[in-house]
Amino acid sequence: MTNVVEFKRVTKSFKNFSLKDVSFSIKKGYVTGFIGANGAGKSTTIKLLMNLLRKESGEITIFGLDQDKHNQAIKERIGFVYDENCFYETLSIRELRKIIAPMYQNWNDDIFYKYIDQFQLPEKQVIKSFSKGMKMKMAISFAISHDPEFIIMDEPTSGLDPVFRREILELLHDIMLDEQKTIFFSTHITTDLDRIADYITYIHGGRILFSKERDELLSEYGIVKGSTDLLDSDIEKEFVSIRKTNVGFEALTSDVKKSKEIFGHEVLIEKPTLDDIMYYTNKGELTCTH
Ligand SMILES: Nc1ncnc2c1ncn2[C@@H]1O[C@H](COP(=O)(O)OP(=O)(O)OP(=O)(O)O)[C@@H](O)[C@H]1O
C-alpha cells in the first residue's frame, strides 16, 4: 500500500510544548482521522505537514517527495482547509475566486460552482456576513476546486451543528468515491470518524500513541468489566488503564484475545468506542508519566 505522507522522527519545540519524534504515515486512497485532546499537537503537526512551520529535525515526505525540495509541486496536489478563517473577509466569493483560481494550474470552475451551488452559497455577499457553517463550506469549495489528490483539514466540523456536519461528511464521502483521493483530518468529534475514517492516528502530549486501521483498532481493544477480586498487580499490568469502583472494575485492554484467555467467562468484554479508547489511553499515560 502506498503512503501519501511519511513523518519520520519529526521534532518541533515551543517554550511549553514539543512534538517528540513524531513518526506516522498516511495511506493513499483512505480517510485518516487525526484525534487528540486540546493542545495535544494536532494543529502543529498539520502546520508541519503544510510546511507552514519549520521542523527542527526529522523527515517529512509527501507523494514520496521531500517536502523542502518540492514545496510548490506538492502544494499544487494538496487541498488545505484550516480551522481559522484566513480568507479576506470583506471580499465576496466571486472576488476571492478571481484571486485564488489563478494560483492553481488545475483550477476547475465546474467543480467550484458545483459546490457553491450545492451549498447554496451567495456569490456576491461579503464573506464576513456568512455563518461559521457557510464559511467552512466555502473554504472546502475553494480547497477542492483544483482537484487535489490529497485533502488536509484542520477540524472541519468543529463548532458546526449536526446538519452542517453531516453535509460536510457527505461531501468527504463523495470525494472518496474517487479511489485515488486521500483525506487527512483532525477532529474532536470521534463519532464523525465512525462514519468516515478508515485509519485513526492518535496524538497525546506531542507523541503519536497509535496510528492504526479503525476496524483493527476496534477489534483489538475491548472494555473489560468484572469484579475486583479477579485482579492482582500482574493482571492489572495487562490493561492500558483501569478504573475501579465499589462494584467492580472497568478497564481497557489492547488485546481482547489475551483478556479472554486470562478471565474466560468471568468478565464481560464490550466493544469500545473511540472515546473510550481516548479516555483510557489518556488515563494510562497520565498514570505512567506522573
Ligand atoms: N507558535 C507557538 N508558540 C508557542 N506555543 C505554541 C505555538 N503553537 C502552538 N503552541 C502550543 O503547542 C501546543 C499544541 O498546540 P496545537 O495547536 O498543535 O494543539 P491541538 O491539538 O491542535 O489543540 P486544539 O485541539 O485545542 O486545537 C499548545 O500547548 C500550544 O499552546
Image (cartoon, grey):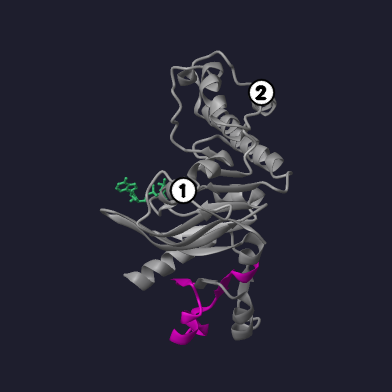
Question: At x 60% / y 21%, what residue is drawn?
Answer: 121
Q: Which residues are magenta?
A: 219-247
Q: Earlier in the sequence, mark 1 or mark 2?
A: 1
Q: Amino acid at mark 1?
A: Ile
Residue identified by numbered label 2: 113
Location of residue 162 by image quarter: top right
Q: Is residue 132 above or below residue 13?
A: above
Q: Is residue 16 above or below residue 73?
A: below
Location of residue 11 by image quarter: bottom left
- Residue 140 pos. (x, y %): 57, 33
Question: At x 60% / y 77%, what residue is drawn?
Answer: 267
Q: Give the camera-side residue of 192 and 229.
A: 192
Q: Dot 1: within a 10 Å radius of its alpha carbon, few (fewer than 14), some, or many (20 or more) residues?
A: many
Residue identified by numbered label 1: 46
* Quadrant into which the N terminus falls: bottom right
Question: At x 52% / y 61%, what residue is drawn?
Answer: 24
Question: At x 65% / y 36%, what residue is drawn?
Answer: 147
Does any portion of residue 134 appear in the rendered image? no
Residue 13 belongs to magenta span: no
Q: Which mark is residue 56?
A: none
Residue 238 belongs to magenta span: yes
